[in-house]
Amino acid sequence: MTSHQAFIERNRASWQRLHDVLDRVTEEMMGRKLANGWSVGATLAHIAFWDRWVVARWDQYDRDGEIMALPDGTDDLGNSAGIVEWQMLTPAQVSELARAAADTVDRRIAALSPAAIAHAVETGRPAMLDRSIHRDPHLDEIDQLLGR
């Protein structure tokens, strides 16, 4: 089993990558399109949404003592529902949302109890602990597009 500290360190590195992208991306760059047709800004807003989703799931765990199973395709539905709004956000809004969501989820994961961590690991939910699993592939796409 991966240690809690390892999750914290991977999250910290991913958090830093996200902040580095946000620090260097210009308004023009936010509008550039990735291979999937989403703009850089929409992709960063997508990362923020799913970071907040993880916080909501941990809040639910605190209430109920378990992480609710979700049907297959939930992530696709969330993305389909969110993309229109994500594309409409200003670069400043995207930056604010992405920074706040990453800060919040990383603090939340760092404060988890050993029982919560064990539950996530035992039920096969590594992305509930390690946000780099979701963030880094998107940041890789953005870096590739922007030539970094």
Image (cartoon, helix red, strand yellow):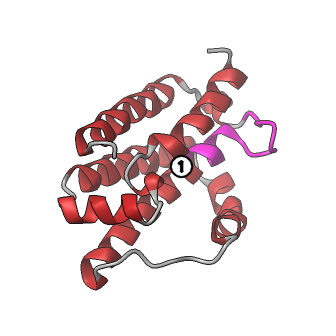
**Is residue 70 on the magenta stretch?**
no
**In this picture, residue 46 sits left or right of residue 109:** right
Q: Residues within 10 Å of mark 1 (few under 14, many from 20)?
A: many
Residue under the image location 45 percent in, 79 percent down: 68
Quarter-wise, where is residue 26 in the image? top right
Residue under the image location 77 percent in, 37 percent down: 33
Look at mark 1 in the image and give the residue it sits on: 47
Q: Is residue 28 above or below residue 63?
A: above
Please name whichever residue, 126 or 16, is drawn nearer the observer in this view of the structure.
126
**In this picture, residue 101 sits left or right of residue 141:** left
Measured as percent of width and height from the top left, residue 18 is found at 46, 33
The amino acid sitting under disc 1 is: Ile
**In this picture, residue 4 sits left or right of residue 42:** left
Please name whichever residue, 118 or 135, is drawn nearer the observer in this view of the structure.
118
Q: Is residue 91 above or below residue 16?
A: below
Quarter-wise, where is residue 3 in the image? top left
Quadrant occupied by the C terminus = top right
Please name whichever residue, 95 or 141, is drawn nearer the observer in this view of the structure.
141
Residue under the image location 71 percent in, 62 percent down: 84
Quarter-wise, where is residue 65 in the image? bottom left
Task: Give the magenta-colored segment's residue range.
Answer: 32-44
Measured as percent of width and height from the top left, residue 123 is found at 43, 66
Principal secondary structure, stretch drawn in magenta: loop
